[in-house]
Every structure is written in structure tokens, then in C-alpha cells.
Image (cartoon, coloured by chain):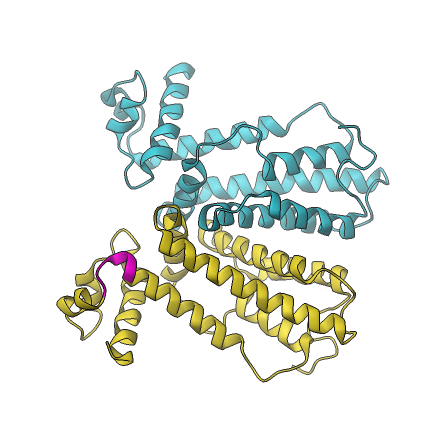
Chain colours: A yellow, B cyan
Amino acid sequence: MDAETRDEILEATNRALCEHGYAGLTVQRIADESSVTSAAIHYHFDTKEELLNAFLDDLIERFESNLSCEESDPRKRLDAVLDAVFSPKEPESDGFPVAIMELKAQAPYHELFRERFLDFDGLMREVVADIVRDGVEAGHFDETDPGEIARLITTMSNGAHARAVALDEHPAETRRVVEDALELHLDWTPSEGADR
Amino acid sequence: MDAETRDEILEATNRALCEHGYAGLTVQRIADESSVTSAAIHYHFDTKEELLNAFLDDLIERFESNLSCEESDPRKRLDAVLDAVFSPKEPESDGFPVAIMELKAQAPYHELFRERFLDFDGLMREVVADIVRDGVEAGHFDETDPGEIARLITTMSNGAHARAVALDEHPAETRRVVEDALELHLDWTPSEGADR
């Protein structure tokens, strides 16, 4: 399958998932959202699980490329992670966080989904731990366990996601708490000593 | 409806929900798990939403009574909250955290579910904030914002729940990070100065 067709199918999957939810997601509805026929979608993806696996894989890649920047200052990089996680720039469709929540609830029944969520978690924790390690080494942050800071930010982000869906709470509420905890752990406050 | 019938219906709801998930939950399946007929269940609860609302309400009450103890030492009370949230004593059915996750994903479509999750969140944050306030007053904890500690513990607990479902991770991983953060915020470590 060429990259363009794949992209079109995955973007249509995103729209159909946000609109109809996991239970209401059908190949026909994905086809309705794109110029690709349902026969062609079936041809490229044998099962709904495979299609959603590709969809999650694509999300992870986009998250990764969002975070890979030329910036070298660990303080600016940590700012960028907090922005990406707690203050997403592009307003997501309301249905998107709900759809991801539904896929998480499906992870115990779909090994491929679980693997993708583990990939995403591993990536996010690695990115944060690298930043903390670099910041400690450069003397910007207090000595601390980088893996633990990674776990704190990632778990708070998981919590913020669940709260957005279940309580309709803005992730900024969580960001404030994370920033105060980081101040204690790292002796660092956002944008401190870094031009924004 | 007498309390016994109500309890029996709600316990059967719990079992049916853990076994069949939200999408597979039917009144017939609840009846199959109990000695109450499906006609009687329909009589007491007009809709599946009302039934699940009562189920969530019951969970909140049980959580509340678990935490209300005669204990007055804020340090022991904080220990008890961490135990209740991150190290549940009774091994839950594997399906239980998944079912709660599914209900959270339904909250945007069911105002009653959202209200119950907001109730639960408000209760948990109030319990933690009270403990922190008492502990600061008694000189056991460093001066801090009780509402913020409440938010930290509650959001980490939401994150631990999502991680248990999506990643199959034990909540103890999150507890360790919470305890280290509490040490920095409160200058308190679990069981410190408290007999267990």
C-alpha cells in the first residue's frame, strides 16, 4: 500500500473513531470518511484490530516527531514535553480522548493494543528521563532519579487524560500540580532560565 | 425496594459487569447472576443507566466507609488512604478495573455517570485534604497546600488505574513515586512515627 493511501485510511479511522466510538467503528464508516473503498480497506487491513494497531502506531510516530527538536537546553525540552502532554496546541476533536480511553479499556483483550500502549509509555518515559539526565549533568536540575521523574510525569499525564474524559477537567489543572512537584524534585520551574 | 434486594441486584451487576463488560451488560445477565428475576430488576431500575448509577453510588459509599475509621493520627490516616488506593486488600476481579474504565469512557454520554465520578473525586480529594490539614496543624507535616496534595494523590490514583488496565502494571509502581513526592512535599514518609 502506498503511504498516501495508508495516511488517508488512518486519518479516516481517526475521524470515524472520534465520531462513532470504538463499538460503532466499522470499515464502512471509515470508507465513508475517505475516498478509499471498504473493499480496499479490507484488502490492506485484515481485521479491525490490525487497522487500530496501525492507527496507534501512527499516533506514536507523530508524538515522537513532535518531541524531536533541535533544542538542546534540557529546561526548554522539559517545557516542550509539558506543553505537548498537558497543553496540546491543536484542539483535538472532543471524541479523541474518549476513543483513546476506549482503546485502553480494550487493551486486556487485544495484545496488539497493549503493545502499542506499552510502546507509547516506554517512549514517553525515555524522552523525559533523557531530559532529566541531561539537565542534572548540566547543573540545571538537582540530582534526582530520572526514571522516577519520568514515571511521575507519565502517570500524571495518564491521570489527566482519564480526568478529561470522566470529569471533563482541563489538563492544565494537572499541569500545575506536576510543575510544583518538579520544583521540589529538580529545583526547577518552567521557563526558568530559558527563553520561551 | 428493600435493602437486601437492592444489594443483591447491585452485587449481581458487579459480577455481570466484570464478566461481560459494559457493552455486554444486560438485565438478563444480571438476573442470571442473582435470584432476582429480570422483571423485578426492570421494575426497580427503569434503565441500564439508572442501574449503573446506583452501582457507582454504592461503590462510593463503600469507599467512604472503608476510609472512615476511629484513627486520629493524620500520618496513619494517610497510610490508610495510600493502602486503599494503591494496595487494595481484597483482590478485585480482573474485570473490575476494566469495567470502571469503560464507565469512565461513557461519562461524556451519561450525565449520571459523570456526576458519580465527580462525587467520588470530590470525596477522595476532601478526605486527603482533611488529613493533610490536620497533619500540618499537628506539626507532623511541613506547611503545604492541602488541596494540591489531594490533587496529586487523586490524579496519580487515576493514572495508576489507567496503567493497570492499559499496561497491566501493578499500582505499587505508582505508590512508590507518590510516596517520594509526599516526602518532598510534607517531609513525611509512610509509617514514619506511626505504628502499623
**Quadrant the N terminus of chain A occupies:** bottom left
Q: A163 or A105, which lies in front?
A: A105
Name the quadrant containing residue A50.
Answer: bottom left
Query: Which residues make up the magenta segment?
Result: A45-50
Question: In this rendering, would A104 be left or right of A89?
Answer: left
**Quadrant the C terminus of chain A occupies:** bottom right
Q: A26 or B142, which lies in front?
A: A26
Q: Residue at x 28, y 66 (%)?
A: A13
Image coordinates for residue A11, horizontal then vertical, percent: 30, 71
Question: In this rendering, would A20 be left or right of A132?
Answer: left
Name the quadrant containing residue A6.
Answer: bottom left
Q: Residue at x 42, y 60 (%)?
A: A116
Tally of marks:
0
Q: Residue at x 27, y 20 (%)?
A: B40
Q: Is residue A50 above or below residue A163?
A: below
Q: Residue at x 32, y 66 (%)?
A: A14
Image coordinates for residue B117, horizontal then vertical, percent: 48, 42
Question: In this rendering, would B89 be left or right of B77?
Answer: left
Q: Is residue A94 magenta?
A: no
Looking at the image, which residue sits at the far right?
B139
Q: Is residue A179 above or below residue B50?
A: below
Image coordinates for residue A77, horizontal then vertical, percent: 63, 75
Image coordinates for residue B125, horizontal then vertical, percent: 62, 43
